[in-house]
Amino acid sequence: MADSAQPRSVVGLFGTQLRREIQTTARSMEEAVNPLIFLFLAITLFALSVGGGVEDLRARASGIIWVLVLLANMLSLESLFRRDYDDGTLEQMLLLAQPVFVPILAKIVAQWCLSGLAMTLLAPLAALILYLPTNELPVLLLSLLLGTPALSLFGAVGAALTVGLRRGGVLLGLLILPLYVPVLIFGVGAVSEHMAGVSINAQIYWLLAITMLALTVAPFAVQAALRISVEQ
Amino acid sequence: MASLKEFWHRLGSPRWFYQISGLWLKLFGVLALLLLVTGSVWGLAFAPPDYQQGNSFRIMYVHVPTAIVSQSAYLVMGVAGIVLLVWRMKLADMVLATIVPFGMSMTVLALVTGAIWGKPTWGAWWVWDARTTSMLVLLFLYFGIYALRQSIPARESAGRACAVLAVVGMINIPIIKYSVDWWLTLHQPATFTLTQAPSMPAVMWLPLAINVLGIYCLFGANLLSRLRLEILRREAGTQWVRDLVARGAP
């Protein structure tokens, strides 16, 4: 723990860890900003390959944004436990007397704020340059807001499993992208169903359900995975 | 109850498992051979042709069993993962390690036979429909487990890391399957359900049922023979394995 005052309660521990994560990221902004730049760079590449036609892009806009959010999120996950693993903070964290999933959850929440939430906030800009109709924008934002926490949570399991490996990058993608499939389907589905004039309740409930499931399973899986990674 | 508990405790000993599994291996092997030969010959040569698909439907006798068993293998892997993480049972680690090649090859076989079946039926080798896509995702899940094991040098850590991934994957498989079903399109609904009588005549589904049973026996035989090999490999330094080799018994 960077702070000298030892937090007693679980809530205090969560808050301390969250503050620490946000502070350390704020002091090395490029780590948080690079995935966001990647997002827009890749959107540009998509526009170049599909052709800049309004109709072509409009039909694919939600799919392009969602796929790139998955990939950008994956890129930002690589550094989730990296620095703490390198300098030994991670081992200290696992030795805490308090439940270990609490600081883990705080780390994931911080990662989500700087990736999933940041991408949701930037999504209007992405939607603008991909000509997504304005009345579809709230649906896209809602789907991103509800779906991206699941990406960070499941992704953290992959990040925890690969943190001890020298070349974890591509492996991380191989481990977590299959788990992202449902979020992608329901996220893109929400926008396309809304475009077709159908109710999107089902998709929204599903995204919420997946995020809730991830919230209950992932912190413990991350904890088990980190112990394995630290022991090797 | 007491004997079940005792059995569970004994499973902790690879040596005991090796000694009793020889008989099981023979049993599964013989059953697999009998069932697969009966089901395949019956299905491929004697079952009547389908009124719509003609003879091309016969690939079903390979396609359906491999597709079913490839999903079961992942399920077994997930259960072994839980057992390994909770009880640290050596045997569960070995199951996790030995099941992946079988599951992966069955998934590939199901995808390939599906493509061959799809060409005359749908007019395309590959169709992005619900079940082909979820099989493809299953293949990627297998690849992930395989790649993770390959990249962790320490065997014990590799086993437990794969266990975590297998358990998380197993929790996700129903959601992946359901989400992919969302854009269900061309694929016919499942051939077999446990609650309903099949819509095919008995002469057509009986060979299929025999082949499904047969491939499960093959799965059992394959798993056991690989497990026994893995036990010998890992226990190579122990006295009982040395005695076994000295006696020349396999």
Image: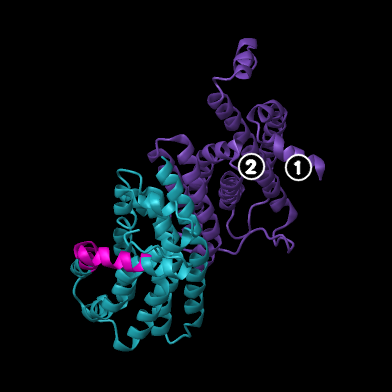
Is A5 in front, or is B236?
A5
**Label 2 is placed on what type of residue?**
Ile
Q: Is residue B249 magenta?
A: no
Q: Is residue B119 visible?
A: no
What quarter of the picture does the N terminus of chain A occupy?
Answer: bottom left
Residue B216 in sight here:
yes
Q: Residue at x 30, y 48 (%)?
A: A86
Using the rendered image, report if marks 1 and 2 lie on a common chain: yes
Choose mark 1 or mark 2, whichever is in front: 1
Whole-Å distance between the Cαs marked 1 and 2? 29 Å
Q: Which amino acid type corresponds to the residue marked 1 in the rendered image?
A: Lys
Please state if B9 lies on the left or on the right of A152 as rendered: right
Q: Which residue is mark 1?
A: B5
> Residue B215, which numbered label?
2
- In the displayed structure image, the side of residue B140 where residue A63 appears, left or right: left
Judge the density around disc 2: few (<14), some (14-19), many (≥20) Cα neighbours within 10 Å.
Answer: many
Instruction: Please give the letter of the chain rendered in purple.
Output: B
Q: Is residue A107 left or right of residue A25?
A: right
Find chain A in the image and tell me its colour.
Answer: cyan
The subunit letter for the residue under badge 1 reads: B
Q: Quadrant of residue B154?
A: top left
The image shows residue B33, relative to residue A33, as above or below, that is above
Residue B61: which numbered mark, if any? none
Decide if residue B14 is on the left or right side of residue B195.
left
> Whole-percent x and y of residue A14?
42, 67
The quadrant in which the C terminus of chain A is found is: top left
Residues rendered magenta in the picture: A17-39
